[in-house]
Amino acid sequence: MILDPEIRRILDGTPLAHFATILPDGAPHSVPVWVGTEGDHIVILTGPSSQKARNLRRDPRVAISLTRPDNPFAPVIIRGKVVDWIDGDAGWAIIDRIATKYIGGPYPRDEARVVALIASDHQSIS
């Protein structure tokens, strides 16, 4: 699904997203994450062995919610699935782009990171 232009504008800003995955026992696991876009996909960064990465490798379905910085009463809801993982130099290029918008510079290289590429199958703004 192509990203709605208004949702893309919000994702390309600096909202903190609530990112939900599914634990092995079926329970939800939700954590705040930085988000961005890559083409018509949503991207997040994570450690390759983090709980969310392990959850997503087992079950790629995700739910993302965030509030617009200019209107916290109009939540953005996205559901989709991870369709690819990007690591190495290509992953770090995306990670640094996301980090720069949130912290003003590249992401520290002291820990391994990967990028999850997410295809949306539902998008809404209330």
Image: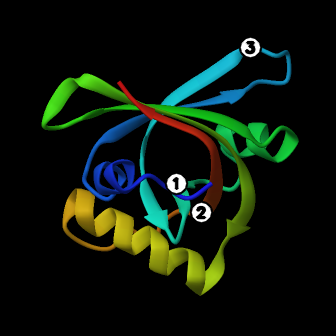
Q: Position of residue 64 (x, y in %)?
A: 52, 34
Task: Locate residue 99: give its quadrant.
Answer: bottom left
Q: What residue sits right under mark 2 in the picture?
A: 115
Image mark for residue 30: none
Q: Secondary structure at mark 1?
A: strand
Specify the amino acid type for callout 3.
Ala
Q: Position of residue 74 (x, y in %)?
A: 27, 25
Q: Is residue 25 left or right of residue 9?
A: right
What's the CA distance linking mark 1 and mark 2?
A: 6 Å
- The residue at the point 63 percent across, 23 percent down is 29
Seen in the picture, residue 31 relative to 10 is either above or below; the reply is above
Q: Secondary structure at mark 3?
A: loop
What's the CA distance linking mark 2 and mark 3?
A: 23 Å
Q: Is residue 113 left or right of residue 8?
A: right
- The residue at the point 85 percent across, 15 percent down is 25
Specify the amino acid type for callout 2.
Val
Q: Position of residue 34 (x, y in %)?
A: 39, 49
